[in-house]
Amino acid sequence: MDRLFLQDSHWYKDDKFTSNSTTQQASIRHITKIRGSELYTLILQELNNNHIKYGRAHGMLKKAINLALATNSYEELIDMYQDFLARKQDTLDQNRVKGTLDNEELDVVNPIITIRKGRRPGRVKSAVEIQDKESRRQCLIN
């Protein structure tokens, strides 16, 4: 019967098992070759920042809900949330109205283009094309 024993890290004296710095440096070098010198771009910073903000706000909301339930003030909390949402929605709507008024002056619409089927009116026919029905019939007969 084979047994597998896991040994604690204090039993190992080898640097290979205690140090991961070489593998981390190699992976970062590889990423910098692909990505360029700037790894942590502005977009990534903003995403990370929004993630942190969302996590902090979610934690605070959970605490507020638990406290409201414990103190029997759930309706008061809901009213505060609804007031906040209404105020911020009004602010967004006002900004959209201002933005649309500014953009209406600059909004240029392309004209509607209709594509006609068949030949264009007034197009000059080439010498190869048959001019009328009678000459077409004669060509078909011959």
Image (cartoon, helix red, strand yellow):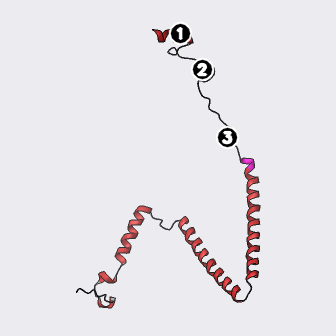
Looking at the image, residue 98 sits to the left or right of residue 4; the answer is right
- First reached walking from the N terminus: tag 3 or tag 1: 3
Q: Residue 86 location, x and y as percent? A: 76, 69
Q: Which residues are magenta?
A: 104-118
Residue at image location 41% in from the left, 66% down from the top = 31
Query: Marks 3 and 2: in contact by CB < 8 Å?
Result: no
What residue is shown with label 1? 135
Q: Which mark is residue 37?
A: none
What residue is shown with label 3? 110
Instruction: Give the answer, above or below, for where 37 lies relative to 53.
Output: above
Please name whichever residue, 12 or 33, is drawn nearer the observer in this view of the structure.
Answer: 12
Amino acid identity at mark 1: Ser
What residue is shown with label 2? 123
Looking at the image, residue 114 sits to the left or right of residue 131; the answer is right
Badge 2 element: loop
- First reached walking from the N terminus: tag 2 or tag 1: 2
Viewer-nearest of discs 3 and 1: 1
Q: Residue 40 location, x and y as percent? A: 50, 68
Viewer-nearest of discs 2 and 1: 1
Amino acid identity at mark 3: Asn
Residue at image location 26% in from the left, 87% down from the top = 3
For the N terminus, the quadrant is bottom left
